[in-house]
Amino acid sequence: MNSPIEIRKVITGVVLTLLWVCIFLFFNPNLAIQWTQSTTDLTYLKPFVILIFFLVIVFYHLFNRAHPETNKLSWTAVLTICWLALILFYPFKDPNNSNGGAVGFFALIGGLAVSVLWVRFFSDEVASA
């Protein structure tokens, strides 16, 4: 018997992840809340919006009950989109960026994880629990 993959959950997870990546790319990092008259008392909105949207993705996968294979497939699609966005949009060769080598190493490890997860789904040995 095949496992019932609920494509709706996977597509919704992909759309939420694409919106999350768009926040990284297109949200203005200079938007801030000024709590007092002092110019040093600013709270920048971009990190909070990124964190809140990440929690939306996590809670969507946590509280939207589905078959375990569907959850695994949806999380694999989310990880793949995040990894592709990192590879495509991160400035590895920027001379002002001192973290390019470390991020590049972890991007390689993430690519290995993405490959292993997709091999699991494309193998013929996936059986329903």
Image (cartoon, helix red, strand yellow):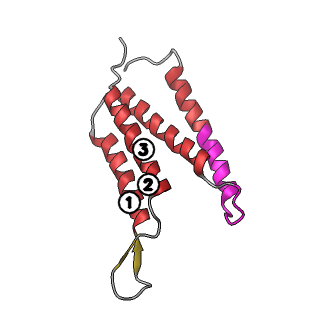
Residue drawn at x 61%, y 45% is: 87
State which region is magenta.
93-111
Residue that numbered label 3 is attached to: 17
Element on which disc 2 rests: helix
In the rendered structure, which disc, 3 or 2, sits on the residue that comes first in sequence?
A: 3
Q: Quadrant of residue 32?
A: bottom left
Asked if the residues shown at circle 2 and circle 1 are in contact, with their CB atoms under 8 angstroms apart, the answer is: yes
Residue that numbered label 1 is attached to: 49
Neighbor class of circle 2 (other Cα within 10 Å; few <14, some 14-19, many 20+) is some
Real-space Cα separation, disc 3 to disc 2, in angstroms: 10 Å
Residue that numbered label 2 is attached to: 23
Residue drawn at x 66%, y 60% is: 99
Q: What's the amino acid at mark 1?
A: Val
> Which numbered disc, 2 or 1, marks the residue closer to the eye?
2
Neighbor class of circle 3 (other Cα within 10 Å; few <14, some 14-19, many 20+) is many
Q: What's the amino acid at mark 3?
A: Thr
